[in-house]
Structures are given as structure tokens and as C-alpha cells.
Image (spheres, rainbow, N blue to C red):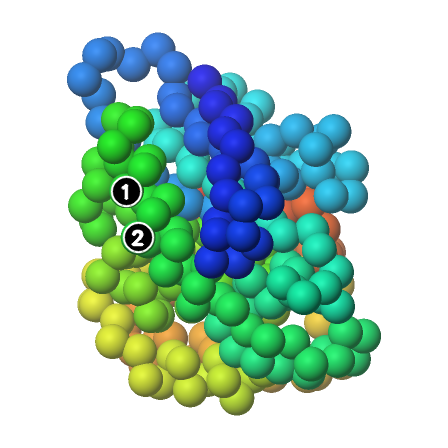
Amino acid sequence: MLDKLTITIPQLTGDEERFAYVYVPDNYEEGTLFPVLYMFDGQNLFYDEEASFGKSWGMLDFFETNDIPVIIAAVECNHHSEKDACGGRLSEYSPFDFTDRHWKDIKGRGKITMDWFVNEFKPYVDDNYPTLPQREYTFIAGSSMGGLMTLYAVCCYNDTFSRGAALSPSIGFSPKDVREMIKNADIADDTVLYMDYGQDEFHGHYIRKIFSEVTELLLYKNVLLETRIVPHGNHSESSWEKQIPFFLNTILY
């Protein structure tokens, strides 16, 4: 079952509506409770016709075909231009202010986004769906800027999220802030994180160096970390779709 809900996030975009998606496994006994995987860019996860670039992750087919016992709770991203007064996806999905070569100065509103996830969206999901609400069963995942937000959630909202999957995380916009975030984070020793990058995303040594530094810092924090360089992987939904079995194997088992 996949519910498509109309929601608002007043702290970010006032009364403007966007969609949230909640997938609940079918064919389970009444009273069964499930872990929850929270995800970013919900419009890209389930249906090709709704995906930003015409290709989704195909998660509905994968989860139904493989009978994965977990709820997915995902929220559509902000589709505004970064030049709009409310800002766009980069702003909502960044914990830090940074300068982008195309959009120039970006005001990071990731904390507002995560506070909404933790204080409003998660309680709604727990109240209306058969969840296991404890930290032990609460996970988070995303790609690109959503991958950066996953790192942020695992580091700075670790009392809520015990496991995460950061696919191709956007760690190159403000690497100093990323490093400081990890260094200053209070991360429990049972925290599990999957993190990958596609081989074709390493143009030169810049991102490879930052990926290596982030990996080292997370290991120093005793995170139970699995990192991968995806052979011929690139920055796209079709590539991330192929990683679903890998990151699920890490965060669910």
C-alpha cells in the first residue's frame, strides 16, 4: 500500500502544498509493527511519471517484489528556484550556508527541515501507521543533497535516527562544515551508516579526497560504516536504484 498525502511545511514554504508518500507492506498479520525508513526527494522514489528527470528509483516495485518488512515515509522536495524568496531544494537540504557557482549564495535551512521531520512528520507517521517508533527502528536515507541531509541527521539527530544511507552525498559544497559537523557530533556506538559514490562521479581528486576524509572521520567516531565506490556508478536515479539492495542489506540487517 502506498499512500500519497498532501502536506504543508509552514516553516519553509508557508501554506504551499507538496506531497508526502507512505509505503506500508501488504499481507502481514494484523498487529504487525514495522521499522520506518524516512527519505528525501519523495517524488523520485516510486513512479517514473512523477520523478524530476523521468526516472524513479522503482522502490515500490522492489519492495513489493521482495516483500521488505519496512515502512517508507518520504517527502517531496521544494521545486522553487533558489532565487525565490523561500529558497529551493538546495536551501532546504543543506545544513550550512554555502556559495554555489550557479546560484551563488545559498542559505542553508537544513535544520528547519530536520526539525520538521523529527517534531512533526515522524509523530504523524507514528500516530497513523503501524510503526516501531523507537530509535532502534528509525532510519533515514537520501541521495545527493538528500545524502548530505542523511549525514546531518545521523550526526546531529542521532537520538532519533540510528541508521542511515547516504548515496552520492553532496559533501563538496562546504567540506569544512561537513568535517566540523562530524568532529563535533555526539554519535552513539551502535550507529550504522551506508555511504557510497559512483566511480564516474570522481572527476579529478577533489571529491575522492573529501570522501576519504569523511570516511576516516566517521570511522574515528566509531560509526559502523560501510562505504562503496560503485563501479561505473553516476549521479542519477537509475544508478541509485541499483544500490537499493546494498544499502538495505546494511541498514536493515
Q: Are marks 2 and 1 in contact (CB under 8 Å)?
A: yes
The amino acid type of the residue labelled 1 equals: Pro
- Residue 201 lies left or right of residue 22; in this view the side is right
Q: Secondary structure at mark 1?
A: helix
The vertical placement of 112 against 101, above or below, is above
Q: What residue is shown with label 2?
A: 119
Q: Where the N terminus falls, by quadrant? A: top left
- Residue 94 lies left or right of residue 51; in this view the side is left
Disc 2 to disc 1, C-alpha distance: 7 Å
Residue found at the far front of this picture: 15
Q: Where the C terminus falls, by quadrant? A: top left
Q: Position of residue 179 (x, y in %)?
A: 46, 84
Q: Which of the 4 image quarters holds residue 232?
A: bottom right
The vertical placement of 95 against 45, above or below, is below
**Foreground pick, 167 / 5:** 5
The vertical placement of 166 against 30, above or below, is below
